């Protein structure tokens, strides 16, 4: 049984998508284009099937049929591995709907992408040192659009791949999928570490993290790779261990050297650092199950001050390395804002995209996002229909709300106009953390909605990323 208010919230989200498509089309017909071929999506309307279609349907069917049973029966370690493998398969099958070349190998080589600049990077130190000097457009050595629009960390990853013998679009796409799919593990693990319900809440999240509709863009875009890296960083901070905090701080900080907009991960980082279970029973259970060291004694979580200090050490190490190499982040950011308005942003109407961006997010995170946000904010109505009762400070509420805060900030800034179905992937993956708020009887229905969203989008649109 599905709650009528949940249905209304999801229907409202879908209506927003339809309205954005209608208004975008009408503006185009009136010679006021919004500069996106299939607004609110950066894609082309092209109903089609492809080699990946049978596998997509099979994977979706298996997850809907047995996903919750598997999530309940496997050990937590086995479940994490299984979820990751299935998520990779799901993402690959969605990409293969468009075929190997169009869906994967050619995805990161078409247009002004990162791989266009990789052959020209013969000296990494020289590239980083001179990076800001090539951000602005209309000069002979300007970076291509995506390289100019991001800090040097993004280009650096693809340079490293090429130097490791994994050059070309195929390897780059597979790297984006393999790293991006780590969010499928990181999000439930963060819930397990911090929710009052611990592992029980995390197990409810797993099937939704696996069939994340944004997998359409994780396979393959660099933003999918960014989502995986930063999700692991947040998860490591949630562990409240010294070494994990150092690594988590380093990964989250590296995130802002992948994309300027990822400074908005701050609300999620704060939740990971400040949230605690506040239940001794669940903490003791997990110490016995997961946190026993080589001596056989449970490892105690570090104090908040130590964790924050450790995270700061990791972050400073990354920021200091880029600064020492010659890239000063604030300079890059200010130049990118100027470059942004040298391109399509100057003609993309803010009045349309400030709300149409959210419509694109609905396709990325799924209509269930509206349901989760409703339940995260309206506790009385949610609990009345039998959803698991959780305190207002539980991460199953806080993580989706933190992601929403980050997205609203990005949206109103005017620096995200169109293409948010991929740009906001690092935030969108966290909405699945709220799946534990859904009433148990309705979860399978919402899983069908999430899987169906990805299937419809990938078969109705020829996505650009």
Image (cartoon, rainbow, N blue to C red):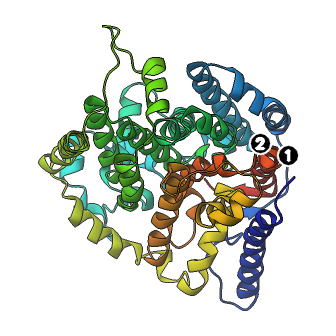
- Left or right side of 168 for 295: left
Location of residue 349 in the rendering, given as x and y in whole percent from the top left corner: 56, 84
**x, y (%) of residue 83?**
64, 29
Residue that appears at 46% across and 28% down: 166
Look at the picture and state if 10 lies above or below 15: above
Is 182 or 307 nearer to us in this picture?
A: 307
Residue position for label 2: 97
- Few, some or many residues within 10 Å of mark 1 (<14, 14–19, 20+): some
As rendered, which of 431 and 300 lies closer to the eye? Answer: 300
Q: Residue furthest left?
A: 324
Q: Which mark is residue 49?
A: 1
Point 68% across, 29% down: residue: 86
Task: Describe the element under mark 1 as helix, strand or loop.
Answer: loop
Residue 42 visible to the viewer: no
Q: Residue at x 73, y 63 (%)?
A: 44
Considering the numbered disc 2 on the image, is that residue within a helix, a strand or a loop?
helix
- Residue lying at the far bottom of the rendered structure: 30
């Amino acid at each position: 049984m599905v709650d009528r208010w949940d249905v209304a919230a999801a229907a409202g989200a879908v209506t927003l998508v339809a309205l954005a498509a209608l208004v975008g089309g009408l503006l185009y017909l009136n010679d006021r284009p919004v500069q996106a071929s299939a607004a609110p999506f950066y894609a082309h309307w092209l109903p089609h099937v492809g080699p990946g279609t049978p596998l997509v349907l099979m994977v979706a069917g298996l997850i809907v049929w047995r996903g919750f049973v598997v999530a309940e029966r496997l050990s937590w370690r086995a479940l994490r591995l299984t979820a990751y493998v299935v998520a990779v398969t799901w993402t690959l099958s969605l990409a293969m709907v468009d075929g190997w070349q169009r869906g994967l190998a050619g995805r990161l080589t078409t247009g002004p992408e990162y791989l266009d600049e990789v052959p020209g990077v013969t000296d990494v130190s020289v590239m980083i040192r001179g990076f800001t000097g090539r951000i602005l457009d209309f000069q002979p050595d300007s970076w291509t659009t995506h390289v100019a629009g991001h800090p040097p960390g993004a280009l650096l990853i693809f340079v490293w791949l090429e130097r490791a013998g994994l050059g070309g679009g195929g390897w780059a796409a597979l790297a984006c999928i393999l790293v991006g799919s780590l969010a499928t593990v990181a999000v439930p693990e963060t819930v397990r570490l911090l929710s009052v319900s611990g592992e029980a809440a995390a197990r409810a999240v797993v099937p939704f993290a696996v069939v994340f509709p944004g997998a359409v863009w994780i396979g393959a875009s660099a933003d999918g790779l960014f989502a995986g890296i930063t999700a692991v960083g947040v998860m490591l901070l949630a562990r409240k261990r010294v070494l994990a905090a150092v690594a988590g701080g380093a990964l989250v900080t590296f995130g802002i050297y992948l994309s300027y907009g990822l400074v908005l991960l701050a609300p999620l980082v704060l939740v990971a650092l400040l949230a605690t279970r506040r239940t001794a029973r669940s903490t003791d259970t997990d110490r016995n199950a997961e946190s026993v060291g080589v001596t056989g004694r449970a490892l105690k979580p570090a104090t908040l001050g130590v964790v924050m200090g450790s995270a700061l050490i990791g972050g400073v190490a990354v920021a200091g390395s880029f600064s020492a190499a010659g890239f000063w982040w604030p300079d890059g950011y200010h130049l990118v804002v100027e470059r942004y308005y040298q391109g399509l942003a100057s003609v993309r109407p803010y009045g349309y995209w400030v709300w149409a961006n959210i419509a694109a997010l609905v396709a990325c995170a799924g209509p269930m996002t509206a349901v989760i946000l409703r339940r995260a904010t309206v506790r009385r109505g949610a609990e009345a229909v039998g959803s698991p009762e959780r305190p207002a400070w539980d991460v199953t509420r806080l993580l989706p709300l933190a992601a929403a805060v980050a997205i609203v900030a990005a949206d109103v800034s005017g620096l995200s106009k169109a293409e948010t179905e991929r740009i906001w992937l690092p935030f969108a993956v966290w909405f699945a953390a709220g799946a534990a708020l859904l009433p148990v009887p309705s979860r399978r229905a919402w899983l069908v909605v999430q899987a169906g969203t990805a299937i419809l989008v990938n078969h109705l649109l020829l996505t650009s990323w």
